[in-house]
Image: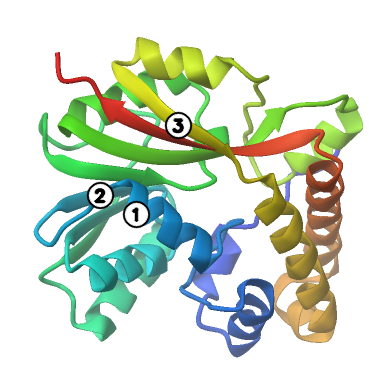
Amino acid sequence: MNKRIDLFDSTYSNFSEQVLEAIRKETYGQDIGQNSWLTVDEYDRFISLLKLTPGHHVLEVASGSGGPALYIANKVNCRVTGIDINENGINTAMQSVIKSKLTHQVSFQVADVNAPLPFEDNTFDALLCIDSMNHLPDRRSVLKEWCRVLRRGQRAVFTDPVVITGPVTNDELALRSLIGLFLFVPPGINEQLIESAGFHLLQQEDVTDNAALVSRRWHDARQHFKDDLLQIEGEERFKGLQKFFEAVHRLTSERRLSRIAYLVEKQII
């Protein structure tokens, strides 16, 4: 059995390191502080689907370092609340929001999104959760909570980056889930859970190409800065993460694990 390797905690605690900034630049082209398979052009498309206007209040689930939340606030002039279970991620996010001088628009807090959310019913006008649904095992309860905190008729976008769409060995699944708890589902499961949670599925899109592209770039950028990363991560973690990115690229480029984006709307009735 492969030993789990931390991708998030150490990354967020060293987020401002110059080498990590250089890796994000090589990986994404435009670095907004993301730590997923998300590029800015893709994020812009997701944001447009939410039909946001100034004054709207957005919930970003699994907000990480906070960079994408700040990006939305700047782009749309709306309010954003970010939640994440990782304290280092939230600390990094809060430092970023202070530097950005957007404290009146953007806030972050530690929250376990597998548990009931610390918000009243009908609080938010939109919700985003990018490449983190696979870490949430009780998916139906999670979706019901999202539905509860969204206002009626409002939208959410989330991605599931590990939908099983081909033959995958147990060793490959173990490599793909090196960085924590994962829930792998076949096509059709998310669609069923969306409807049973009180949402209506408006559209879904195969966005696997982005995961294949970003995982290859991320692996190559890390290899480029190997000597610097060894000082931060140590050899075991560096090698483990390189195996992880290799597995992501192989499985997505061969379309055996697919990344699917879902646009859903809270039912009015």
State the separation of the CA atoms marked 3 and 1.
13 Å
x, y percent for residue 78 = 17, 62
Label 3 vs 1, first from the N-terminus: 1
Q: In the image shown, does 120 or 69 lie closer to the viewer?
A: 69
x, y percent for residue 93 = 35, 68
Q: Is label 2 in a helix, a strand or a loop?
A: loop
Q: Amino acid at mark 1?
A: Ser
Q: Amino acid at mark 2?
A: Lys
State the separation of the CA atoms marked 1 and 2.
5 Å
Q: What residue is rendered at 64% in x and 20% in y?
A: 187
Residue 64 in sight here: no
Please give left or right for residue 149 compared with residue 136 in the image: left
Q: Answer yes or no: do the residues labelled 1 and 2 have beta carbons within 8 Å?
A: yes
Q: Is label 3 in a helix, a strand or a loop?
A: strand
Q: Amino acid at mark 3?
A: Gln
Residue, disc 2? 51
* Residue 184, picture quadrant: top right
Q: Answer yes or no: do the residues labelled 3 and 1 have beta carbons within 8 Å?
A: no
- CA neighbours of label 3 inside 10 A, class few (<14), some (14 to 19), many (20+): few
Residue, disc 3? 203
- Please determine whether, in this image, residue 160 is positioned above or below residue 82: above
x, y percent for residue 149 = 19, 32
Numbered label attached to residue 48 = 1
x, y percent for residue 64 = 44, 58
Q: What residue is rendered at 22% in x and 53% in y?
A: 52
Please give left or right for residue 103 compared with residue 133 in the image: left
